[in-house]
Amino acid sequence: MAAAPSLLGGCLCGAVRYRIDAAPTAVMICHCATCRRAAGAPSVAWATIPAAGFAFTAGRPAEYASSPGVIRTHCAACGTSLTFRRDCGGEVDVTLASLDDPEALPPEYEGWLAHRLSWEAVDPARPGRDGGG
């Protein structure tokens, strides 16, 4: 799958902006309890990007260690969830809804379906997985 060159995104208030210059290695909807709580949403759609192809271009997001070895970022001003990264990985997950054009990267599958809230519908045409990426 090829990402459009230089996908742009950022938070609701515009204080934090980013740029993606690499094709994602995965695009998915996560139903895990940690993502749900971190975003305050029933699920979170993510694109996994090689770290070298992602950069913040304006502002500096706040960081939160949500679990051992995991750092999530969000805008300190408006609270928009932006990224997820593991200490040991060379990738960063970026929230699809924070892209200027979220339609540019449609999710390919849904992960952690065993954690899904019973009242959230899933697309039966989209493959599901027990785990994440």
Image (cartoon, rainbow, N blue to C red):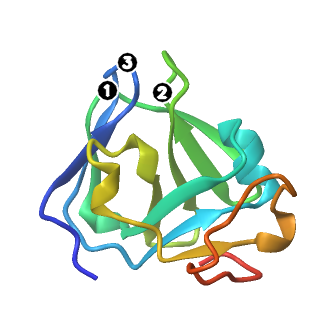
Which quarter of the picture shows residue 124? bottom right
Can you identify the residue that label 2 sits on? 75
Q: Is residue 29 left or right of residue 52?
A: right
Q: Amino acid at mark 3?
A: Cys
Specify which label sits upstream in the sequence, 2 or 3: 3
Disc 1 and disc 3 in contact, CB within 8 angstroms:
no
Specify which label sits upstream in the sequence, 2 or 1: 1
Q: CA distance from mark 2 to mark 3?
A: 8 Å
Can you identify the residue that label 3 sits on? 13
Nearest to the eye among marks 2 and 1: give it.
Answer: 2
Can you identify the residue that label 1 sits on? 59
Residue drawn 43% across the image and 52% down it: 96
Q: Amino acid at mark 2?
A: Cys
Rate crowding at label 1 as few (under 14), some (14 to 19) or many (20 or more) other CA atoms within 10 Å: some
Helix, strand or loop for disc 1:
loop
Of the 4 image quadrants, the one containing the N terminus is: bottom left
Rate crowding at label 2 as few (under 14), some (14 to 19) or many (20 or more) other CA atoms within 10 Å: many
x, y (%) of residue 75? 48, 27
Disc 2 and disc 3 in contact, CB within 8 angstroms:
yes
